[in-house]
């Protein structure tokens, strides 16, 4: 055959065969990569489903390997929508929070972005996929150095990093088009205001230790114009910053803020004081106490529908918590896993933010009307703070909750 006798054609044929095999192998490898599958599922079922619409942000979240930014022991949990400890009292932010903050500043390919991190480098990596240049300041030296090595190893060449006091910014590279602060000061640090260009945007969580709110600022005529966004919960910037807070929590008197869901100061239909809100809404009629209650609805097994709130509690001073609230349920069923069920949980953490205990106050199914639940919860001796989580937690049905109260029982 003439085809077989043509060296040039034969070489092209071999190249086609080899290339096709390589492409097929690469595609098969991608499809068999469990972490990639988990990333795609996270983006589809959590991020896009709960309001992340920016395509560049979604593409970055699909691409960046979050499991390489956490400790090896936590890699199996990397694509759950939760924070994870990374050492030195710091955490890596949940994927939704990273996507939300990134989307909020409207990132553009030409942007120069300053990011104040807590040590993993993950937020910087997400930004790297979208904007022109990223300048990241990590606050803990050992974490900052390892983050810099990780970012370089993974090829994020448009990221410049250093270890230092993030509140001072990075003056030699200012002004910045956008600034993201992934840890919580009490007020906006002035150096960051000075280093934001005119017309630039900054997102930052502000407030008390366990009661913070995202604010989006835009610089107009040298001043910051603010927009209040959603409630959130972030770790403090440094130990010193924590010590210098004017308002500090009283760990001997743990309590829940806005447990009746009556306060919504910015009228965004989200109860103030509660963060990480998913598939919930405030209902203004039929509350067992007051005028409002919180309702959760979910039809997809495994998808989150809950709210959270953190509070300080000293396990050496408080032996028990008295927890009480109102609850009702319609067509409640478990989700994909045993623990995915309507319930109220209290998660306890020590000073290093390691889990030291969990308590479950009810796990409900079926249908029942309003009833009041009370329970005494034991506080682990080494507890320093707690997070209360209530909702369907991956279960399905319609859950109503009202008048949540937590008080110490010494």
Image (spheres, rainbow, N blue to C red):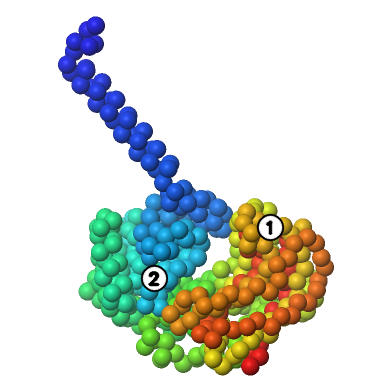
Tell me the quadrant of the picture where the C terminus can be found: bottom right
Residue pointed to by mark 1: 334
Relative image position of residue 60 (x, y in whole percent): 40, 54
Mark 2 residue crowding within 10 angstroms, few (<14) / some (14–19) / many (20+):
some
Q: Earlier in the sequence, mark 1 or mark 2?
A: 2
Is residue 409 or residue 39 the one in the foreground?
A: 409
Q: Name which residue lies at 33% across and 58% down.
A: 128
The answer to whether residue 169 is visible is no
Instruction: Tell me, for residue 86, which label it has, or none.
Output: 2
Q: As drawn, which residue projects farthest toward the top?
A: 1
Relative image position of residue 383 (x, y in whole percent): 52, 83
Q: Name which residue lies at 43% across and 63% down.
A: 74
Spatial distance from mark 1 to mark 2, Cα to Cα?
A: 31 Å
Pointers 1 and 2 in contact (CB under 8 A)?
no
Relative image position of residue 89 (x, y in whole percent): 40, 78
- Drawn side of residue 393 relative to residue 402, left or right: left
Is residue 340 or residue 391 the one in the foreground?
A: 340
Q: Name which residue lies at 62% across and 54% down.
A: 336
Could you say which quadrant of the image residue 401 lies in? bottom right
Relative image position of residue 237 (x, y in whole percent): 39, 80
Vertical relation: 177 (above or below) 42: below
Could you say which quadrant of the image residue 199 lies in? bottom left
Instruction: Tell me, for residue 94, which label it has, or none.
Output: none
The answer to whether residue 73 is visible is yes
């Amino acid at each position: 055959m003439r085809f077989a006798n043509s060296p040039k054609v034969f070489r092209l044929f071999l190249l086609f065969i080899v290339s096709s095999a390589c492409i097929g192998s690469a595609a098969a490898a991608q499809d068999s990569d469990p972490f990639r599958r988990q990333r795609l599922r996270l983006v589809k079922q959590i991020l896009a489903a709960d309001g992340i619409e920016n395509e560049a942000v979604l593409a970055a979240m699909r691409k960046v390997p979050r499991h390489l930014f956490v400790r090896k022991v936590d890699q199996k949990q990397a694509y759950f929508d939760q924070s994870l400890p990374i050492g030195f009292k710091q955490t890596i932010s949940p994927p939704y929070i990273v996507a939300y903050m990134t989307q909020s500043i409207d990132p553009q390919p030409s942007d120069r972005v300053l990011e104040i991190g807590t040590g993993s480098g993950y937020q910087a990596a997400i930004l790297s996929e979208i904007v022109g240049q990223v300048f990241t300041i990590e606050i803990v030296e050992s974490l900052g150095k390892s983050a810099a090595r990780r970012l370089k190893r993974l090829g994020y060449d448009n990221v410049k990093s250093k270890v230092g006091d993030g509140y001072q910014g990075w003056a030699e590279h200012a002004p910045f088009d956008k600034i993201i602060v992934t840890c919580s000061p009490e007020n906006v640090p002035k150096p960051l205001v000075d280093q934001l260009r005119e017309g630039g945007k900054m997102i930052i969580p502000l407030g008390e230790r366990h009661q913070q709110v995202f604010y989006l600022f835009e610089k107009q005529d040298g001043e910051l114009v603010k927009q209040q966004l959603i409630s959130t919960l972030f770790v403090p910037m440094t130990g010193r910053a924590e010590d210098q807070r004017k308002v500090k929590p009283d760990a001997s008197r743990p309590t829940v803020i806005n447990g009746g869901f009556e306060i919504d100061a910015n009228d965004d239909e989200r109860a103030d004081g509660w963060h990480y809100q998913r598939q919930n809404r405030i209902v203004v009629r039929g509350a067992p106490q007051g005028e409002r209650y919180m309702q959760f609805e979910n039809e997809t097994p495994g998808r989150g529908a809950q709210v959270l709130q953190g509070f300080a509690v000293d396990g050496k001073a408080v032996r028990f918590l008295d927890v009480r609230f109102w609850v009702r349920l319609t067509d409640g069923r478990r989700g994909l896993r045993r623990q995915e069920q309507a319930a109220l949980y209290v998660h306890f953490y020590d000073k290093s933010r390691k889990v030291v205990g969990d308590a479950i106050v009810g796990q409900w199914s079926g249908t029942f009307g309003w009833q009041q639940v009370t329970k005494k919860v034991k506080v682990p001796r080494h507890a320093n703070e707690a997070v209360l989580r209530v909702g369907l937690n991956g279960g399905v049905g319609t859950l109503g909750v009202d008048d949540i109260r937590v008080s110490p029982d010494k």
